[in-house]
Every structure is written in C-alpha cells, then in structure tokens.
Image (spheres, rainbow, N blue to C red):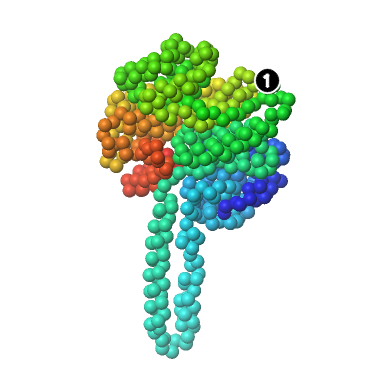
Amino acid sequence: MFIADIRKEFYEVVANQRVALLVAADIDALCACKILQALFHCDQVQYTLVPVTGWQDLGTAFLEHKEQFRYFVLINCGANVDLLEMLQPDDDSIFFICDTHRPVDVVNVYNDTQIKLLIKQDDDLGVPTYDDIFRDEDDEEGGDSGNESDEGSEPSGKRRRFDEGAVERRIERQRAKREWEARRREILFDYEQYEYHGTSAAMMFFELAWVLTKDTKDMLWWAVIGLTDQWVHDKITHMKYVTDIATMQRHVSRHNHRNEDEENSLSIDCMRISFEYDLRLTLYQHWSLYESICNSCYTSCHFKLWTLNGQKKLQEFLADMGLPLKQVRQKFNSMDMSIKENLREVIEESSNKYGMKDIRIQTFGVHFGFKNRFLASDMVHATAALLESTEKDESDSDNFIKALDSLSRSNLDRLHSGIDQAKKKLIAVQQTVASCICTNLILSQGPFLYCYLMEGTPDVKLFSKPMALTLLCKYLLKAFVHSTRNKRCKLLPLIMAAPKDVEKGTVIVVGIPPESETSDKKNFFGRAFEKAAESTSSRTLHDHFDTSSK
C-alpha cells in the first residue's frame, strides 16, 4: 500500500518503537540511511542497522531479527518482489519500504496491512488496476457449487434433472476465466518486463526531515549525493535528473538564505553547499587535469584515447586551451591561481570546438571549512570505491560501515582514502576498456553484444562487484559505439561477464540497454536472464536487487 502522509503513517508510527533498518549496498541507500539515522538520533528512536547485499542476505537478516522486531524499514530493497511470499513473516510484522527499484510488485501495492510503500506516486508507476490482476475465486465457483450440493442431497431414487442451462453457464464462466487469465498475464508482462529507477530514497527521507522541520545541511548534502549517485551510475533519465536537481536547488537556496545571518557562517568548521555548473571530468579537483581527462568516460570516449590518433587529438585539445603541459600534469591544487580562475570557461570553449557541447553539467559542490571542497560526484565515486573495496579481505559489512563513515564530514581521512581508491578503480576501468576494444573482445551475438573478462585479466577481482562491473559495462559500450563503424552494432545492448569467485567457479553477469542520449533507462535483461536460465537449465542465483545483475 502506498503511504500518502509519510509523517503520520510512517514516522509517528515508528517513533516509539524499536526498528530494524535493512539497507542495500548502494550509495543512495547509504545516504538515505544517514538521514534516517540523524532523525532517529533526534527523537531517540531505537534501531538496529543491518546491511544487506542481496535477496539471500535480506532473508537471513529477517530470520535473525523477526523475534525482536515488529517494524522493519527496507531501504532500496524489497519493492520489486512479493515480499510476504519471500519472507513468510508473522501477521503482525510491518514493512516500510523506500525503494527506487521499479516496477513495484503488484502484491506489495495492494497489500494494505503489512506492506507500506514510501514511494512517490508521481513517478509514472503505471500500476495495473486491482480488478485486472486479482479475482475473488469464491464468487466464481459459488453459483455452481450450490447447485451441486443441492443435487447431491436429493433421495437416490429420484431421477436427477439434467440442467442444460447450468452446464452452459459453467462453460461460459470457464471461458471468461481463461480470457481474464490470458489478459492478466499480458498486463503483468507489459508491467514487469522492464526494470528502471524512480526518485532517490535519500530525497524521499530528506523530504520527511523537511516536513518534520528537522532538516540540516548535512541531510541536504546526503540527499544531493543520493541523487548524484543515480546520475553517475546512469539509473535515471537526464530529464528526471534535471527536474530533481531543481528541487534540491530550492532547498539549498533556502538553507543558504537561512544561515546568512548566523555568526558561524565563516567559521573554520562551517559547511557551505553551492549549486555549480561544473565539468564532467571525474575527480579533477583531487587529481591532475590530464589524468582526469584521460580517465573520465565522457572525454576518453570522445577522443578515443585508446588509439594513437586519440592521444594526438588530446594534445591538440590541450594546446588549443593554451594550458602548459607542466600545469596540466600536476595536481589541481598546485596549479597557478591565474589558470584555475577561469579554467571551466576555457575548457568549455575548447570543448565546443571539439564537439563536446555538454561538457558542463548541473551539480552541487560543498566546502567543509576553508580547505576542503568536494563535488557531489567526487563523493559518489569515493563512497562506491570504499563500498566495493577489494584491497583488503574485509567483509561486505566492514566495507559498508567504512563507506557510511566516509559520508560524515568528521571523517575526511576516510573520504580521502576513498578518493584514492576511486582513482585506481577509474584507471583500471579505462585500461580494461582500451584492452577490450584493441583486442576485439566485444562480440556481436545477433541481438546483443557480449564481452567476457577472462581469469588473469588485470584488475579482474575489482570487477567481481556489481557496481564496478556495471560502471565498466557502461563505459565499454559507450567506447565501443564511438569506435565501431557498424551502424547496427551501435543500437545493440551489451552483456558482460566476469569471474566472481574463482574457487567456486562462479561468474557475475550484467546486462545494459543500448547506448543512447535519449534512452529511457529501462532495462529488460532481468526477465531475459530468468528466461534464459530456465530454457538452458543453468545453475543461476538471481540474488542482486537490480535484476539485470546476476
């Protein structure tokens, strides 16, 4: 059931209870969790935080906590399956689900006792009507069963009267039922065939904080990061991103206006959020400009930097900007102030000449005190690198806690460590893209493109994680579209596989839709993978909350 009043129907219900928070391992979920934790601390709500990486984790976590808790809050998990069927909870368990995954399972939508959906209904959900999906069996059979019981109670000596009308009515009812079931299957197939994403969970919880008049700048910044995560990982359309950015911009203006008169607005530990029209160069303020251009998907694909010609073009581009190589190759913080002052304008002007007309994007930046400045996308890359870290053999829960900590401004050391790991990850992605294209590892398999990373490939361990492999998959498809001359291949989706666990012999598979600026970001691979597993009798585990990752 959709919740209309998030304050009354959700927050006031859980405010005096013990709550289990089951949080998925993605950046938006982490940010939503931080906002909810801050609200719970305000009102001294007792809660237990449990990170969950997939459906198996979710099932295990529920079994472990169902005796102690009656209220469960699920963040970015649980909406796109029949949750009651999966978890088999007691009748008094209540689930509040704030999930960006679409489509929402119809049973969750129409269950009004145990499932409460914290989901924006203006997200064009297209949920089928109740009567199209559910039918009361008792009403159908009621007419006939009455006749039969009456007939059965007649004395055996009497001759049973053959009621032709009843037979015809039954045949008519069965035919109508078959037609209804066929139509139901068709409606459900149309509704469930594509997977996509709705409004950020962090934005939903920030709106709750705003309604409660308990929103802070930290919460606003986490909501911005949650939205930026959806853009960085290509989960929402450009139109949806711009619309949500405008919503966030209004909140940022409100907070900045509110704090103008405060004495600490220029103190060393202050926090300032600003709307920026910044460059699509990943981590450029924490790297050298040259390395950022080489390892950003947008510029790397445009110049085709895996070719000699592309490298030459990059040098021409830098010369056109009039930037000395010495300046471009040193850390951004060490560049001359005279160059940094109008760097964005210089880069934009040259980019337009080289066909990169949208190198600047609407986003937000933050200042912590005087020294530390971060863009929202920097935070997303750093937190994602910590969340899927493979540097030490630490558990998923440890990585989750580290990633969660990096979002607090009191933990800047952890954030800087995440930025360093993110740089290594981006370099690994670009090197893998270059080697896949130069060695023709992308094969056309009829209706789709396919690429398999073999064991022994450099950095292959890094790509055993779903977010890292999906990012590689998106970069690779973009690069392939820029480099191929085959017009048909430019319109194909890409399936990518990489070793997950060498000892167990398992493989992780990800599918993404065709590369297109106007794409609606809807992914059909979830259903396709299930059907393929069925028809080939393969041993598969559909464990990821994004059904297009297996």
Q: Is residue 93 left or right of residue 81?
A: right
Residue 316, relative to residue 475: is it above or below? above
Residue 426 shows in this picture:
no
Say which amino acid is labelled 1.
Ile
Q: Nearer the viewer, residue 139 or 129?
A: 129
Residue 291, relative to residue 541: is it above or below? above
Q: Residue at x 50, y 69 (%)?
A: 138
In the rendering, at what x and y percent does residue 71 appear?
A: 63, 47
Residue 281, relative to residue 142: is it above or below? above
In the rendering, at what x and y percent does residue 403 appear?
A: 56, 29
Label 1's element?
loop
Q: Quadrant of the N terminus?
A: bottom right
Q: Quadrant of the C terminus?
A: top left
Q: Residue at x 39, y 66 (%)?
A: 178
Q: Residue at x 47, y 60 (%)?
A: 133
Q: Which residue is mark 1?
A: 268
Q: Is residue 41 left or right of residue 89?
A: right
Residue 159 shows in this picture:
yes
Q: Nearer the viewer, residue 444 or 58?
A: 444
Q: Residue furthest right?
A: 263
Q: Is residue 218 left or right of residue 336?
A: right
The quadrant holding residue 445 is top left
In the rendering, at what x and y percent does residue 502 appear?
A: 39, 30
Q: Residue furthest top?
A: 326
